[in-house]
Image (tube, helix red, strand yellow):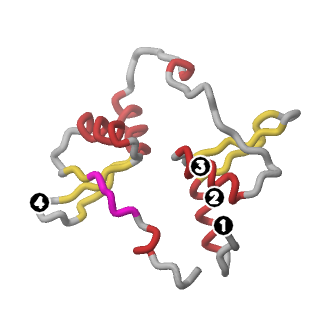
Amino acid sequence: MEDIFVARVMSTSLETVRADTLVEEAAQQMLANEIGSVIVVNEDNQLEGILTSTDFVQIVAERKPKDQTPVSTYMSRNVTTATAQETIRDAADLMVEHGFHHLPVVDEDEGVIGIVTTSDLAAYLSREETPSPD
């Protein structure tokens, strides 16, 4: 894997905003493009920062909405899952196919027993010395 460079795996299709863009506009842009972040650049396209979906959690928490809306109003109901016996390749393929960053792991008897995230997969790959065969 040491022969695989970032240029080979990076995405070159970027959504950018300026530092003075309103967060509502950035959120709309992220939703419209089904992405989890926008890159903040100046007028010369130089990096100034990044705004991610995680940042919106802080935005909402600081604004402290008062409308007592339960999670069930917004949660996804048709959740794709994996089992502990599936290979990470199958889990990764599923995550890539659906654009997921989180994949709950379930057991028929015990219910939810864990979660696989893109960070988990990246950490695993960072410890591997050779790529798995196709």
| Label 4 SS | loop
The answer to which image quadrant residue 100 occupies is top right
Q: Is residue 22 left or right of residue 104?
A: left
Q: Choose the circle earlier in sequence order: 4 or 2.
A: 4
Q: Nearer the viewer, residue 117 or 32?
A: 32
Amino acid tagged 1: Tyr
Q: Position of residue 74 (x, y in %)?
A: 50, 23
Q: Choose the circle earlier in sequence order: 3 or 4.
A: 4
Q: Choose the circle earlier in sequence order: 3 or 2.
A: 3
Q: Which residue is mark 1?
A: 124
| Label 1 SS | helix
Amino acid tagged 2: Asp
Tell me what residue is drawn at x 59 percent, y 80 percent: 1
Tell me what residue is drawn at x 28 percent, y 58 percent: 49
State the separation of the CA atoms marked 3 and 1. 15 Å
Give yes or no for contact between labels 4 and 2 (Cβ–Cβ under 8 Å): no
- Where residue 95 is drawn, which disc sits there? 3
- Where residue 43 is drawn, which disc sits there? 4
Q: Residue furthest left?
A: 43
Specify the segment rendered in magenta: 11-15
> Magenta includes 13?
yes
Q: Main secondary structure of the magenta part?
A: loop
Tell me what residue is drawn at x 80 percent, y 33 percent: 111
